[in-house]
Image (tube, rainbow, N blue to C red):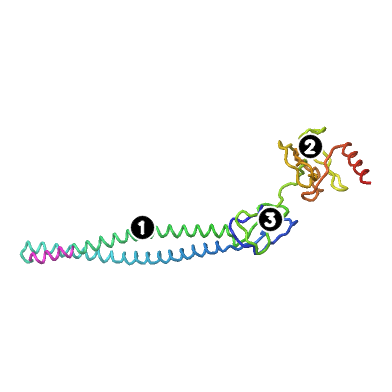
Amino acid sequence: MVASEYIGTVRDIAVRQGDRVERGDVVAHLSSREYDEELARLQFELATLSADRARMTSKIGGARQLVELARKRLKSAAKFRTRMETGLEDGVATGTALNTAYEREYTAREDLERITSDITSLRAELGALYQQIDQRYVLIDRIESSYDEGRLVAPASGIITEVSAIESSVIRPGNPIMKIASGKPYVLAYFENGSLYELEPGQEVTMHYGTKTLRGTVTSLLPVSEQLPEEFQRSFQPTSRAQIAEVKIADDAHHPPLFAKLDIGGGLFSSVHRLFDWMLET
């Protein structure tokens, strides 16, 4: 089953019923307004965060330069305070001058601590910005990978058996666009419960399609009695059910068309049965 993971509009269907495809082949193109809007929103947020990161980095660079000046200022104020203390002891300085020296050193140390604290806060904010930017990059990458510019690819190699969507139609997530039959072909045989013949895994059977005869092997008997397909039902009769056998086609080179109706029998009984049917028709 080929389906979309998002709501979108079918722009182009690159295959048709009966085409053979390989896994990964592009089978359809979609466009999604939701994806476009979400991608545009994330890219806008990424641009805003990147601008904030640039401003924050610039602030940190400027603050680092101020730190050097503040350290020199503090060193100078400390020397001045030491000289004033020595001068006061020697009687060449006054208490007022010493108080001024204390104030200068206090202010210089306060400015240095403030600038250092600002740098620490700016670094923390910058780290958070980097995390948010990385998250936006991851989300954008996921969206672009999931959206893949609207391309839908075949999940397996096989044959297109049904195309249920048309161009310009709007599909929702999970709605089938087309079906691909993959793997080796096999035959499902419906037989009546309680019939006079018996089927066993490994038993060889003969399958008739038009004028062609194919041989096959019963691979398994399914433990269910399933409602027969509509083409097997008879009008104005209760719904019939039958058991199911899976048959492997022996000759891989002469497979009948997919979903073809086959007559299955075995040995002489099948030949007599087909001859009897031919006599009735003629």
Look at the numbered discs 2 and 3 and tell me whether their residues touch, using CB distance below 8 Å: no
The residue shown at (26%, 61%) is: 114
Find out whether residue 137 is within the magenta segment.
no
Q: In this view, does 197 lie to the left or right of 112?
A: right
According to the image, label 3 marks what residue? 178
Q: Distance between the residues labelled 3 and 1?
A: 52 Å
**Residue 124's disc number:** 1
According to the image, label 2 marks what residue? 192
Looking at the rendering, the stretch of residues picked out in magenta corresponds to 94-105
The residue shown at (20%, 65%) is: 76
Q: Where is residue 35 in the image (x, y as percent from the top left)?
A: 55, 61
Q: Nearer the viewer, residue 129 or 257?
A: 257
**For residue 217, which quarter of the picture?**
top right
Q: What element carries label 1?
A: helix
What type of secondary structure mainly makes up the magenta span? helix
Identity, as a three-letter code, of the amino acid under mark 1: Ala
Q: Distance between the residues labelled 2 and 3?
A: 33 Å
Identity, as a three-letter code, of the amino acid under mark 2: Glu
Q: What element carries label 2?
A: loop
